[in-house]
Amino acid sequence: MKTEELVNALSNNTEPVDRGLVGRMVGIALGAGVTVAFEAHRRLLNARPFWKS
């Protein structure tokens, strides 16, 4: 397959992309990471004993 044929094949039946998808995914990953880091700090390092539940 030549380059021009590949480009034509990939450009057929294209659909619009959701522009906010990447931002939402990064936000969710950031929130999850902060939560995991906070819990690891709280449980493993025992930084603030008065936070114990």
Image (cartoon, grey):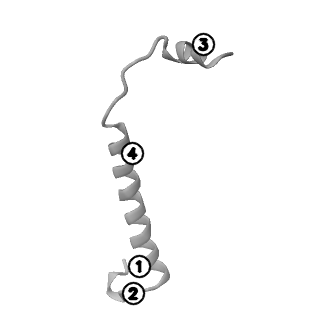
> Alpha carbon of mark 4 to alpha carbon of mark 1: how far?
26 Å
Mark 1 residue element? helix
Image-based side of 9 in relation to 46, left or right: right
- Looking at the rendered image, the disc whose residue lies closer to the viewer, 4 or 1, is 4
Query: How busy is the neighbourhood of tag 1: few (under 14 within 10 Å), some, or many (20 plus)?
Result: some
Looking at the rendered structure, the kind of residue marked 4 is Met
> Alpha carbon of mark 1 to alpha carbon of mark 2: how far?
6 Å
Q: Which residue in the protein does label 1 denote? A: 42
The image shows residue 16 at horizontal and vertical percentages of: 36, 21
Q: Earlier in the sequence, mark 4 or mark 1?
A: 4
Q: Residue 16 carries which label?
A: none
Q: Which residue in the protein does label 4 denote? A: 25
Q: Residue 5 carries which label?
A: 3
Q: Earlier in the sequence, mark 1 or mark 2?
A: 1
> Alpha carbon of mark 2 to alpha carbon of mark 3: how far?
61 Å
Looking at the rendered structure, the kind of residue marked 3 is Glu
Residue at 43% x, 86% y is 46
Looking at the rendered structure, the kind of residue marked 2 is Ala
Query: How busy is the neighbourhood of tag 4: few (under 14 within 10 Å), some, or many (20 plus)?
Result: few
Query: How busy is the neighbourhood of tag 3: few (under 14 within 10 Å), some, or many (20 plus)?
Result: few
Q: Could you tell me if the residues under marks 1 and 2 are in contact, i.e. CB atoms within 8 Å?
A: yes
The image shows residue 12 at horizontal and vertical percentages of: 49, 11
Image-based side of 46 in relation to 48, left or right: right
Q: Which residue in the protein does label 2 denote? A: 47
Q: Earlier in the sequence, mark 2 or mark 3?
A: 3
